Amino acid sequence: MSTRSSKTFAVRDYALATTLDCGQAFRWQQHRDGWQSVVDGRWVRLRQISDGIEAVAARPQSDWHWLTDYLQIEVDFATILSAFPVDPNLQAAVKAHHGLRLLRQPPWECLASFILSSTKQIIQIRQITELLCQRFGERVESHGETTWHAFPDADRLANATEPELRACRMGFRATYLLEAARAVASGQLDLMQLRTLPSEEVRQRLMDLKGVGEKIADCVRLFAYGHADAFPVDVWVARALRQYYFRGRNVPLPRLRTFAADRWRGCGGYAQQYLFHHVRSQSGKTSRLAKARR
DNA sequence: AGCCAGGCTTGGT
DNA sequence: ACCAAGCATGGC
């Protein structure tokens, strides 16, 4: 078995930049032609190359499973698409963002990040997460100038104080994060065990936490546990659904959820990510156009 | 039921 | 330049 600090993964139909920067994970930073972050406590730099992804770690790795699992590079893209019902709107989104993938994130980091995400915009979630990692995460070995920290584990955060967390500018979310950290650290909530439980039960156990509603529970189901049916509905997805399927009518959230569950059956997760990204990037375009016209 | 709770970015004026 | 809106959860 080779142990080198860099490795090339052959993978087709993988839009690395879009995948890392589309609001499912919050710690990826662009660096020249690549992307850097900490995955499961290991610093890594990724770069899109022809027919694959090149990874550089801080030190030699005999086993890259931590990364291949995170990136889900074994997933066959065509299989995902073939599960979608015929749908011009979704087809347009898939065409525009071909190769956008879902990541498989470590459950605690995912849960904590999305607790911090409530009523926050992506850029702010990044800022809060960065502060949290700098102040509470273990320093990790890396290449380059920047210092990197692991995402702080639940034990560490369970021993933090609410004011310390608030100082990371998370506001009222501090109590929710602290409660979640204590539940996980004490073993009262076993995130590993959730892997083995049925979807509905996972959802319920997550929603038992204060600060975790339907949307955030579904984000964790989708991005950490890989539940293909999870369909988190945030403002953007709601906007996309109303625009594409209800002629812009003001359809209430619960109706949108049942609509999505019915339309995509078990495979709404990927559809949701495409709709989310598509409607967001279109919104950016149209507002820039509106500005340019003036 | 409707408002508030951090705070930072974006968009409209 | 300034000001409002957005954000998605729980508590009052």
Image (cartoon, coloured by chain):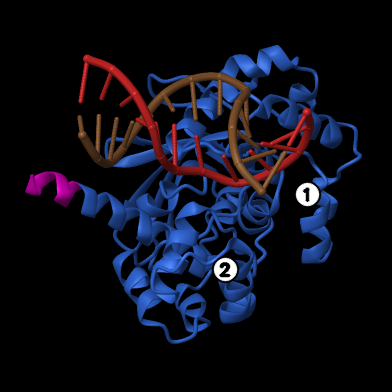
Chain colours: A blue, B brown, C red
Q: Chain of mark 2?
A: A
Q: Which residue carries the number 2 mark?
A: A256
Residue A50: quarter of image: bottom left
In the rendering, at what x and y percent does residue C5 appear? 41, 39
Q: Is residue C10 above or below residue A213?
A: above
In the rendering, at what x and y percent does residue A250 appear? 48, 64
Can you see residue A97? yes
Q: Is residue A278 above or below residue A65?
A: below
Q: Is residue A292 within the magenta segment?
A: yes
- Magenta residues span A288-294
Q: Is residue A166 above or below residue A187?
A: above
**Residue plotted at (62% across, 80% down):** A262
Mark 1 neighbour class, 10 Å CA radius: few under 14, some 14 to 19, many 20 or more: many
Q: Is residue A202 within the magenta segment?
A: no
Nearer to me, A30 or A173? A173
In the rendering, at what x and y percent does residue A276 appear? 44, 59
In the rendering, at what x and y percent does residue A90 appear? 40, 74
Q: Which residue carries the number 1 mark?
A: A206
Which of pointers 1 and 2 lies earlier in the amino acid sequence?
Answer: 1
Mark 2 neighbour class, 10 Å CA radius: few under 14, some 14 to 19, many 20 or more: some
**Residue plotted at (51% across, 75% down):** A80
Helix, strand or loop: magenta stretch: helix
Residue A33: quarter of image: top left
Q: Say which quadrant the C terminus of chain A sits in.
A: top left
Nearer to me, A55 or A218? A218
